[in-house]
Amino acid sequence: MIGTMMNTYGREAQEYWLKNLPSRYQALEDPETFFSGLGEEIAQQVEQATEKLQGTDSADESYLEKVARLNSARITAEELVKQDLMFLPPETSALMSPTELREEWDAVRPMDEAIIDWVETFWMAETMPLADELEETANRWMLPVSFLQEMLQAELPRKVWNDREDLVAAAADQRFEAWMKAGADLSNP
């Protein structure tokens, strides 16, 4: 529900967030209080910016010219303040279809080559990672620890990876789903 106890700026911000920032909106504990406060802050900053932008009266300025100058200052101030405080960049998920979002995620996520390189680094050094590091890596990549251990012990780790395309694809699907649940932020795939 759009807040009824807030000013116009607060309602406009709430509507914008509902449409363009749904994950951030859902994370708010008390949207009514948040947008009431945001609306008040926007109103105060618009007033301050308007005063700075309106300039001073001129002796040869007509009444209509003065009204136009003051209105122009207010409109400019509103645009500037709202851009800074209200119109945050939309969440990618609000703008893309699920297929487009998956394609974009695949393009920006850490590449499979990174995990292969990680395994090959230990393999070439003929050492094993510590148990904590192995478990952390398995969790981050959503792969079974036993699979990483198999790669670490194999003569050709890359072949083990390539032979288990089903497991690798399922892990990528799980990471994508977890990323979607976390808010689908393409700056943090």
Image (cartoon, grey):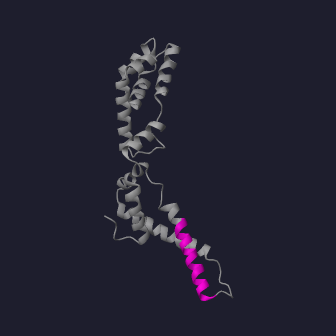
Q: Position of residue 147 (x, y in %)?
A: 37, 20
The vertical placement of 83 against 143, above or below, is below
Magenta span of residues = 62-80
User: Which quadrant, please, contains the C terminus?
Assistant: top left
In the displayed orientation, state which residue is furthest to the left: 1
> How many tags in the picture?
0
Q: Residue at x 42, y 71 (%)?
A: 8
Q: Is residue 174 left or right of residue 114?
A: left
The vertical placement of 176 against 90, above or below, is above
The one nearer the camera, 113 or 122, is: 113
**Can you tell which quarter of the image residue 51 is in?**
bottom right
Q: Position of residue 145 (x, y in %)?
A: 37, 22
Q: Residue at x 38, y 35 (%)?
A: 175
The vertical placement of 88 against 109, above or below, is below
Q: Position of residue 34 (x, y in %)?
A: 40, 62
Q: Is residue 186 left or right of residue 74?
A: left
The one nearer the camera, 75 or 121, is: 75
